[in-house]
Image (cartoon, helix red, strand yellow):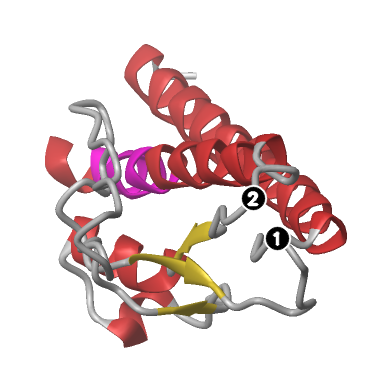
Amino acid sequence: MFANLTSGLDFHAKALVLRAERQRLIASNIANADTPGFVARDINFKDALIESTGASTSELGRVIKPQVSGTSGATTNPRHFALPVGSDSQLTRSANLGYAIQSQPSVDSNSVDLDRERANFVDNSVRYESTLRFINGQSKSILSAIQGQ
């Protein structure tokens, strides 16, 4: 019975972690906008959420996928350094972490489009906030049910 009450919280908690991870990736892209040769990273939020919850696509409804290509974290040249993998990352072994598609060619081979990254940052921030509100609302509902109000 209690699992039924908290299943919504579990779903939103996993979504919140993925949103925070995406926010970190977008901030990293923005911070490296002037780094020569930097390749922007992003996640496929829908697939990452399906993987983390074990839900089917029909259970999640329609979720907009960010544009990503390539899912391998391997280097493409033996002289490249492998990306550092943090232990706190939810996407360290995930196939949902990919490279953002370059929309504007640049002389220094940097694939960060600041306009796109800023828009993604704001969009993800709004979605993060709404997920927090869902969690807060569900927590209040459960608390009022427990207190008998």
Residue at 24%, 47% in the rendered image: 82
Looking at the picture, how far across and down is residue 54, in whole percent? 15, 66
Looking at the picture, how far across and down is residue 94, in whole percent? 20, 59
Q: State the SS at label 1.
A: loop
Looking at the picture, how far across and down is residue 45, in whole percent? 44, 64
77 left or right of 126 in image: left
**Amino acid type shown at disc 2:** Pro
Of residue 119 and residue 73, the one placed in the foreground of this image is 73
Task: Find the residue positioned furthest to the top.
Answer: 147
Residue 12 included in the magenta stretch of the image: yes
Q: Are marks 1 and 2 in contact (CB under 8 Å)?
A: yes
4 left or right of 19 in image: left
82 left or right of 105 in image: left
Residue that carries the numbered disc 2 in the rendered image: 36
What are the residue bounds of the magenta stretch?
Answer: 6-15
Residue that carries the numbered disc 1 in the rendered image: 108
